[in-house]
Image: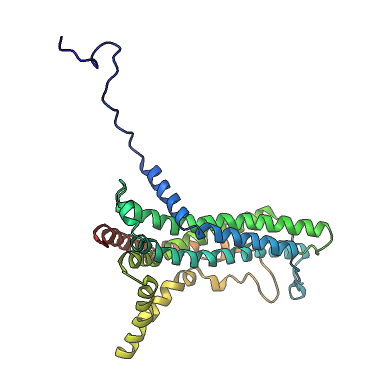
Amino acid sequence: MNSTFAEAPGGASTAAAPPAATGLGVTLLTLVRRELWEHRALWIAPLCLTALLAVVATIGQIHIDLHDVARIGSEQQKVALFTIIQWVLAMPLYVLAIFLGGFYLLDCLYAERKDRSILFWKSLPVSDGLTVASKLLVALVVLPFGVFALALVAHLLFTAILGVRVALGNLPAVFTWNTYEWLRTELVMLLATVLAVLWYAPIAAYMLLVSAWARRSPIAWATLPVVLGPLLEWVAFGTRYLMSFFHYRTNGIWEILGVAHAHIITKDALHPIGTALEVLNFRGAFATVDLWLGVAVAVAMAFAATRIRRYRDET
């Protein structure tokens, strides 16, 4: 008989089954978890700052002079102040996220070459493009929107602690909870976060490109063109085109949005942050061509960083 054991009825095949292919989403999630494990400051620092804000709410003293805003009703004052506190609590977390994201982008591709861990990661069946995409995903999605969620939690915690202190008579009732205005403030913050991520995407991709290219001191290499470029242009040609471009790329989206005309806090009144939905030009900001040109430039620089990581040999 020429039949094999594997062909016999009830016989078990000796050939090993091929391993199941790992989905793209699972691989990307694993890479993101790797980044958060290797760069723990990305989530430890915001958590520490949130804990510090909770301590301030617990033992801090609050004094607010509402004499200049006495023209509006007391209840309206308290609701407006409630949303302003909500915004103010988020600002330290966003500023921290900017610094953390910048240092992370300048370090992530450079550090793996410096400590030679890139040799191990390249031995795994993960493409350079997916690796670079995971790092941009951490900087432009996980970090900013994680901070947005943490700011939401921080405000709820801050409000609960202050509410307990007011109930115990340790503080005056200077604000009033209003769910509608709370939701509107969160919507303003969410839209501003999305807008900032899209607008600053080319800057993030530039930092990542420098991290992939620089053999040492990526911070210096990223800073020198920004500092020396406008200076050399002014000395050589007497013009300030680069300076104007850098200024526009830093603050231009907020000028298009019309932040200077929001007037949330004025001499005569306090207004809820949610009123920015009627005042600010979100439609025009999201529709501006420069926003999407910047996104396209960010994609091109991310592709360049991928090619550099693929072919650079540090051995």
Query: Residue 81, image x and y in percent?
Result: 70, 65
Horizontal side, residue 88 vs residue 119: left or right = right
Front-most of residues 309 and 91? 309
Q: Is residue 95 left or right of residue 228?
A: right
Q: Position of residue 67 (x, y in %)?
A: 77, 75
Q: Residue at x 34, y 68 (%)?
A: 210
Q: Toward the viewer: 263 or 154?
A: 154
Task: Give residue 308's quadrant in the image.
Answer: bottom left
Q: Confirm whether residue 129 shows in the render.
A: no
Quadrant for the N terminus, please: top left
**Where in the figure is residue 257, as x and y percent of width and height?**
49, 68
Residue drawn where x is 63% and y is 66% of the image: 88
Q: Which residue is most to the top?
A: 1
Residue 10 visible at all: yes
Residue at image location 30% in from the left, 67% down from the top: 213
In the picture provided, is 4 more to the left or to the right than 58? left
Q: Residue furthest right?
A: 169
Q: Is residue 14 above or below residue 171?
A: above
* Quadrant housing residue 135: bottom left
Q: Quadrant of the C terminus?
A: bottom left
Rendered image quadrant of residue 263: bottom right
In this image, 96 relative to 104: left or right?
Answer: right
Q: Position of residue 150 (x, y in %)?
A: 58, 56
Looking at the image, is 172 positioned above or below residue 250? above
